[in-house]
Amino acid sequence: MSGVQQIEISDADSEQRLDRWFKRRFPELSHGRLEKLLRTGQVRLDGKRAKASDRVAAGQVVRIPPLDLPAPPATERAPRPKSEHARVAEERLARQLQKAVLYKDDDVLVIDKPAGLAVQGGTGLSTSVDALLDALRFGAKERPRLVHRLDRDTSGVLVLARNAKAAKNLAEAFRYKETRKIYWAVVVGVPKIHHGRIDAPLQKSAGKADGRSRERVHIDEEGKHAVTEFALVEKAGKNAAWLALMPVTGRTHQLRAHCVALGTPILGDGKYAGANAFLAKDDLPRQLHLHARELTIPHPARKGAIHVTAPLPDHMKKTWAFFGFAAEPSRDPFAGLER
């Protein structure tokens, strides 16, 4: 391909990362080469330098330099059809998501994402919420759009936009911190103070395990600004505690890394705390105990806000029963907190 191109972002492509947009449009372009083009300013967004993680919006224009990509083979192999077992499993999961709706109107859809389901696909993943979006149309003309993310092993509130305008407004609400997100977690150990703020910058680091890439973050003064408010809701002796967590920023794995920094890793988070993330109690599930409990966000098309709460997943209900935690906090853990 020769010559500079100027491509306008369509409504359908709005609110996705720039590198994902390139991956879909130019699958032969390697990520390494794209990073070099961005670093040297050859790829621009509305005439300005851009980063791979920037989110594109409808109407923006991407400058693309001559790429000279190899032509795809004349006879490409057709994608392998899914096995009957995989197809049935995907259909079952789609029905599960359809029953997991917490809120729905013409502009917004909120679901209770199950733990273990990735929001977007990747290497080694059989399916994701993104791959099942057609099952969440509920008669709408447009396919719903993802506007934020949850970790694969985190359960709870996940917001989807049902049209392009709503996607833009919801994404801006997340970007400009106009939301109030509360997570519940069980941690190993008990924080020394009942309320506090973790202000620790985070840097991404690449690693491998089992032959696959494993994205992680670590505290680094050169990293991105990351802040989490926390409150101790209830404790189980000195062994464990129920924390309410309110992220002020939204970095990858922020709550998991910040809980480790606090000295109380999230129960079941072997990725960040190894054996220290588990208690020697056979009755406790070994899954990650992190749940996106509630979200308040401005409505994208009218006045007022949407407030949604997601029930605890089964594995956390078992842990609540084991420790005898209350069903609800006696009061708002962050009442009166100045943001």
Image: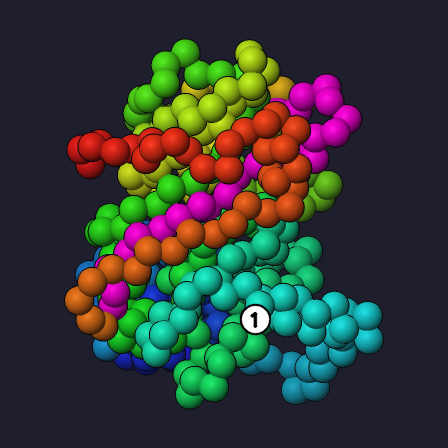
In this figure, what is the number of numbered marks? 1
The image's colouring method is rainbow
**Residue 75 as seen in the image, left or right of residue 175:** right
Give the amino acid at mark 1.
Answer: Gln
Image vertical order of residue 157 relative to residue 56, above or below: above
Residue 269 seen in this snapshot = no
Q: Quadrant of residue 163?
A: bottom left
Relative to 153, does residue 29 appear above or below in the rendering?
Answer: below
| Residue 287 place in picture, x, y as percent | 65, 38
> Residue at label 1?
98
Where 162 sits versus 156, above or below?
Answer: below
Question: Could you tell me residue 92's position as x and y percent?
Answer: 70, 70
The front one of 188 and 304 is 304
Question: Measured from the top left, where is residue 68 in percent x and y?
Answer: 45, 74
Which of the 4 quarters of the picture holds residue 173? bottom left
Report whether 152 appears left or right of 48. right
Q: Quadrant of the C terminus?
A: top left
> In the image, residue 309 lies at what x, y percent?
42, 52
- Determine if the magenta segment contains residue 282: yes
Above or below residue 267? Residue 12 is below
Image: magenta residue range: 277-300
> Would you say 90 lies left or right of 115 here?
right
The residue lying at 70 percent from left, 30 percent from top is 284
Q: Quadrant of the N terminus?
A: bottom left
Q: Residues within 10 Å of mark 1 (few under 14, many from 20)?
A: some
Which of 60/242 is in front?
Answer: 242
Q: Secondary structure at mark 1?
A: helix
At a point 36% along the width and 51% down the height, the residue shown is 295
Q: Is any part of residue 73 visible from this angle?
A: yes
Q: Is residue 143 on the magenta stretch?
A: no
Horizontal placement of 257 versus 303: left or right? right
